[in-house]
């Protein structure tokens, strides 16, 4: 054990105390008063110091032996009180303290409380063992008491004649309680399954032994009226007290610990002593009895032999039992280990099983990409929530959310970026909804959200929060991605009472948003079903349309402001549906993009437009250029270059008369866009950036791409006459375009004021109803030929 500073101090105090006491007794042996005073002070301070040490230990102890230290401290305090009472008589009253007096009560209490303290250390689990210890202790105590009674106490009592019963009890009390403690100690520390902090135990035993010796001498001296406080025997008491106190420094951990492994080969001598001591003491008592009687007849011999035999039989049975118990314990421990091992294996297996079950459950109910609920799980949750809402008569909202133009990102960049984007979207949705609803990824870029909230204003606030949150830029692997979202909303019970119906209606509302320009939200209304059905009809009819020549191309003229001449036209597709009539491109281009049909349609437009332009050129409308729209999805296809090349080769149109209109969405991946555009430019065609300003392309990006034309989006032109802001924007775009050497075209010009403003600000070309609406080829041709287009 490592000796700490306080430990060293304690040892020094003990030594100094004993030496000083001895010195005092020697120095003042002739000064009665000083002798008594010093002796009393030393004898009072010793238990007090000891009590302090023990209390200190009690304070620091957290283990299960905490009470042991406290009781031992009380035992020392009891001794201190006894000494104080003694001092009161000797020093204050200056009389010999009475015997028995109250101080004797406290002295007898000292070992009794000590016994209680040690009782704390006995494992209470095995009651029969405890009884065995007590029984053994009783045998030894009764033997030693009867011997000391016979040879010490009785003669003293006889000499001192008429003393009351209390006198006798107190007299007998000392040896009985101290022997009980002593033997109790031995019994406890011999327990088979207790390991002892040996130095601690040794100090306690020695301390206790000092007491027994000192008490015996004391009793004898008292009986002879020879005792006084200054008697050197008091040093022995003090030593005992201080040894008990200092034992608290000799066990830094639990003073006892349970020993699980029994070493059967190791002989425990102390245990043997405990086993033998009761029999030995009985045997000694028997011998003394015979010796005392001094009469040996056949009865004495017979009873001696039979007692020996009984004792031997007892010992034999006990030893045998102990061996058997030991073996049993060993087996138990082995069994215990095996059970533990097996339990551990079972627990591990069980954990694996539970883990795989929960994995399977997780897979069955979650979308692995986003970690959100999947549709199946969501329907389950929704159905539960519906039942609850029905029972409570409450309303709820279902949101159907679809990212706009996600396909473009997915195809323009690569799918892994699309996946990461979906994860980010899921995160933002979670952040918006928090615990106010349940989100599910229904598949692709579609999400469904359940809001257990019937208040429409609150629902709209939440939806606006989502739209705004998703409108913020996404930074993914160096790409700045912009997405918008369309959200449809349905309410329970207004729009349906079943899971399927509510989701379908929110879906219908979402499509309605898509049809009306995306990036918005709408609450379901019954008339939306028609537009939804219309979308379904479009989706189904689109495939057939490509095969059955249902597409047409309309042409819209472009006017050069400087010369007031028509310099070209934009080819705009129309679909002449057998039932729905003329379907505008905004209604089917996005569906064509989603279904992948855009590629085929785009290739067809390219060829037809080139062919028509070439034809018109040959028929005298020289220098007419044509602009053809190229969808972002089409732009991503590897064969775009091939398509353009083929169209030019087949129609023999001079590439300089063909302009490809691309939108800002191709710039999601600038490197790829630059690569494709450069290749197309090698063919000799022109490139135009359509709807400039409506997307998120930055001016820096434009500078690095080989554009020839910049088309200002119609939205800026609409209010150009009235809005100063729009005027400023348009002016800047024109200036910027010019600085970059681009031709600037304004789209959607509808009136003269707009036209004049653009002319004044240096815009190169305009396109819009004021010049001419998109027209079928014949009408376009005749208008151009009649020159009835704006002059
Ligand atoms: P865009 O390329 O920006 O075409 C201009 C759109 O503005 C045309 O709509 C045109 O009719 C309309 N417009 C022109 N001037 C005015 C005006 O003064 N007032 C108003 N209110 N509108 C005007 P359209 O033909 O419905 O086409 C819509 C969009 O569909 C086009 O926008 C283009 O992005 C796409 N699109 C059209 N044809 C094709 C095609 O063959 N391929 C692809 N990929 N997309 C096409
Ligand atoms: Mg266009
Ligand atoms: Mg445009």
Image (tube, helix red, strand yellow):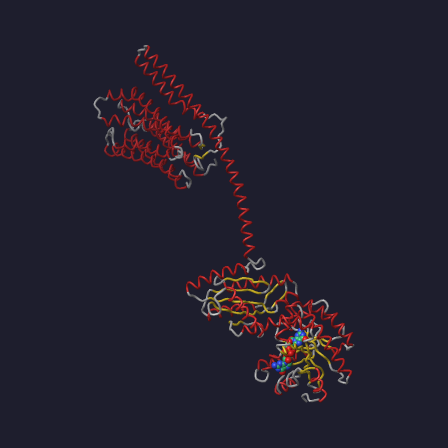
Q: Quadrant of residue 349?
A: top right
**Residue 640 place in picture, x, y as percent:** 72, 70
Q: Residue furthest left?
A: 162
Residue placed farthest to the top in the image? Answer: 297
Residue 533, x across and y down, in percent: 57, 72
Viewer can see residue 691: no
Residue 187: x percent and y percent?
A: 39, 28
Q: Quadrant of residue 19?
A: top left
Closer-to-camera residue (752/163): 752
Q: Is residue 781 above or below residue 118?
A: below
Q: Nearer the viewer, residue 457 or 15?
A: 457
Left or right side of 85 for 132: right
Q: Residue at x 61, y 67 (%)?
A: 406
Query: Looking at the rendering, which quadrant does residue 618 occupy?
Result: bottom right
> Is 782 positioned to the left or the right of 455 in the image?
right
Look at the image and tell me in which quarter the C terminus lies: bottom right
- Residue 299 visible somewhere in the drawing: yes
- Indicate left or right for 321 with 420 as reference: left
Q: How many marks?
A: 0
Looking at the picture, how far across and down is residue 573, in whole percent? 67, 77
In the image, farthest residue toward the front:
579
């Amino acid at each position: 054990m490592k000796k700490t500073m306080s430990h060293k101090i304690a040892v020094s105090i003990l030594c100094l105390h004993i030496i000083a006491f001895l010195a005092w007794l020697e120095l003042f042996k002739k000064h009665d008063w000083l002798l008594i005073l010093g002796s009393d002070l030393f004898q009072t301070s010793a238990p007090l110091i000891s009590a302090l040490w023990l209390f200190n230990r009690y304070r620091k102890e957290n283990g299960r032996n905490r009470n042991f230290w406290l009781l031992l401290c009380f035992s020392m305090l009891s001794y201190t009180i006894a000494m104080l009472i003694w001092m009161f008589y000797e020093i204050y009253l200056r009389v010999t303290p009475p015997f028995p007096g109250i101080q004797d009560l406290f002295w007898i209490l000292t070992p009794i409380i000590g016994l209680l303290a040690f009782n704390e250390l006995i494992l209470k689990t095995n009651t029969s063992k405890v009884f065995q210890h007590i029984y053994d202790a009783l045998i030894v105590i009764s033997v030693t008491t009867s011997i000391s009674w016979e040879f010490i106490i009785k003669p003293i009592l006889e000499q001192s004649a008429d003393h009351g019963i209390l006198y006798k009890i107190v007299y007998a009390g000392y040896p009985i309680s101290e022997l009980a403690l002593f033997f109790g100690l031995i019994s406890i520390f011999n327990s088979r399954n207790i390991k002892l902090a040996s130095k601690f135990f040794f100090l306690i035993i020695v301390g206790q032994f000092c007491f027994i010796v000192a008490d015996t001498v004391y009793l004898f001296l008292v009986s002879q009226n020879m005792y006084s406080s200054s008697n050197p025997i008091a040093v022995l008491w003090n030593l005992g007290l201080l040894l008990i106190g200092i034992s608290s420094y000799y066990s830094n951990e639990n003073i006892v610990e349970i020993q699980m492994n029994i070493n059967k080969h190791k002989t425990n001598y102390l245990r043997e002593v405990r086993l033998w001591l009761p029999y030995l003491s009985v045997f000694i008592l028997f011998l003394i009895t015979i010796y005392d009687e001094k009469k040996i007849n056949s009865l004495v011999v017979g009873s001696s032999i039979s007692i020996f035999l009984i004792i031997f039989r007892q010992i034999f049975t006990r030893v045998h039992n102990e061996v058997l118990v030991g073996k049993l314990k060993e087996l138990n421990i082995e069994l215990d280990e095996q059970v533990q091992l097996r339990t551990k294996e079972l627990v591990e297996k069980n954990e694996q099983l539970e883990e795989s079950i929960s994995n399977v459950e997780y897979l069955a109910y979650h979308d692995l990409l986003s970690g959100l609920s999947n549709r199946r799980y969501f329907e389950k949750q929704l159905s539960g929530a519906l039942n609850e809402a029905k029972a409570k008569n409450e309303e709820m909202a279902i949101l159907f959310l679809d990212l706009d133009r996600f396909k473009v990102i997915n195809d323009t960049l690569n799918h892994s970026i699309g996946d990461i984007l979906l994860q980010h979207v899921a995160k933002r949705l979670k952040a918006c909804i928090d615990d106010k609803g349940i989100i599910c990824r229904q598949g692709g870029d579609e999400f469904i959200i359940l809001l257990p909230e019937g208040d429409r204003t609150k629902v709209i606030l939440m939806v606006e929060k989502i739209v705004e949150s998703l409108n913020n830029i996404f930074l993914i692997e160096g790409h700045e991605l912009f997405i918008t979202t369309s959200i449809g909303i349905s309410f329970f019970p207004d729009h349906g009472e079943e899971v399927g119906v509510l989701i379908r209606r929110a879906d219908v509302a979402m499509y309605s948003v898509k049809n009306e320009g995306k990036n918005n939200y709408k609450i379901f209304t019954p008339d939306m079903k028609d537009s939804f059905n219309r979308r379904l009809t479009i989706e189904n009819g689109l495939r057939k349309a490509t095969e059955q020549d249902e597409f047409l191309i309309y042409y819209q003229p472009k006017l050069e402001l400087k010369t007031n001449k028509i310099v070209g036209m934009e080819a705009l597709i129309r679909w002449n549906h057998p039932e729905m009539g003329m379907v505008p491109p905004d209604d089917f281009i996005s569906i064509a993009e989603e279904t992948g049909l855009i590629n085929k349609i785009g290739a067809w437009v390219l060829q037809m437009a080139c062919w028509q332009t070439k034809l018109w050129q040959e028929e005298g409308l020289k220098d007419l250029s044509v602009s053809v729209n190229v969808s972002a999805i089409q732009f991503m296809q590897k064969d775009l270059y091939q398509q353009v090349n083929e169209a030019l080769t087949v129609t023999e149109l001079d590439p300089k008369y063909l302009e490809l209109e691309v939108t800002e969405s191709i710039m999601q991946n600038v490197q790829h866009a630059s690569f494709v555009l450069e290749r197309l430019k090698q063919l000799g065609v022109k490139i135009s950036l359509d709807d400039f300003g409506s997307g998120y392309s930055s001016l820096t990006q434009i500078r690095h791409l080989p554009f020839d034309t910049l088309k200002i989006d119609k939205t800026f032109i609409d209010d150009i006459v009235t809005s100063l802001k729009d005027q400023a924007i348009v002016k800047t775009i024109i200036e910027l375009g010019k600085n970059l050497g681009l031709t600037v075209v304004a789209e959607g010009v509808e009136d003269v004021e707009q036209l004049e403003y653009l002319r004044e600000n240096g815009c190169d070309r305009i396109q819009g109803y004021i010049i001419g609406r998109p027209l079928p080829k014949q009408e376009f041709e005749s208008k151009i030929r009649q020159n009835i287009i704006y002059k």
